[in-house]
Image: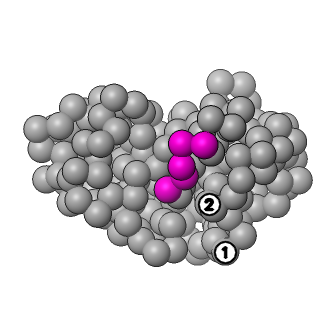
Amino acid sequence: MKVKICGITNLDDALIACQAGADALGFVFYEESPRYILPQKAKEIIKNLPPFVKTIGLFVNVKASEVDDICTFAGIDMAQIHFEANAEFFTKLQTPYIRVVRATCQEDIEKYKDEYIIADAFVESYGGEGKRIALDWFDGIDCSKIILAGGLTPQNLHELEKYNFYGVDVSSGVEITKGKKDHAKVKEFVDNAKRF
């Protein structure tokens, strides 16, 4: 299972996540988030990362051109579109992207079954609150293109074993405080996720 550690704000946390075996690191470019990072700081972290680790930029309520500009400047591989953008937005967007589905019901998830998505619980603040999606929403669904986010911890990953998710995305579940990772939890989370 692929693992993304989101809400990276410093090089130390980024390197620990890489050493633990994370496949991707997330950088939050949403100014209202306590995990917000300046593009310049993200760029400095990214230039010190080892190869083969994907960098993902999280964006909320911005224009496609702003996403492209920040990703190009900071060296971000992929944009995580964490809001309900219209078709025109995706037509204009030049950066590879993954859509976040802020699910309020099972039908929200099934709507995008043919593309890779991040499935997260709907919260007004656009994530980072540790709220979980009801797992029974995934019963009978092919989860091989779904990355599950929201409310995940090293202790509850075993509950996902039967669903065959493509990956998991964690932020608050491996933190000491908002924006600072607990290195032991990061390692435990990656280890547990990689078991299946």
Q: Classify mark 2: helix, strand or loop.
A: loop
> Which labelled disc corresponds to residue 32?
1
Tell whether 123 sits left or right of 62. Answer: left
| Residue 15 found in image quarter | top right
Tell whether 16 sits left or right of 142. Answer: right
x then y, percent, for residue 44: 87, 47
Indicate whether 17 appears above or below 130. above
Magenta stretch holds residue 193: no
The scheme the figure's colours follow is one colour
- The quadrant the C terminus occupies is top left
Tell whether 178 sits left or right of 121. Answer: right
Residue bearing the label numbered 2:
60
Q: Classify mark 1: helix, strand or loop.
A: loop
- Of 156 and 121, nearer the camera is 121
x then y, percent, for residue 32: 67, 74
In terms of sequence position, does the residue under pointer 1 or pointer 2 come before the other? 1
- Of 186 and 98, nearer the camera is 98
Picture residue at 53% right of the left edge, 58% below the top: 83
| Residue 162 found in image quarter | top left
x then y, percent, for residue 108: 29, 52
Tell me if I can see residue 24 in this picture. no
Amino acid type, callout 1: Glu
Pointers 1 and 2 in contact (C-beta within 8 Å): yes
Amino acid type, callout 2: Val
Task: Give the residue furthest to the front.
Answer: 88
Q: Which numbered disc, 1 or 2, marks the residue closer to the eye?
A: 2
Range of magenta residues: 84-88
Category of crowding for the residue at label 1, using alpha-carbon neighbours closer than 10 angstroms: few (below 14), some (14–19), many (at least 20): few
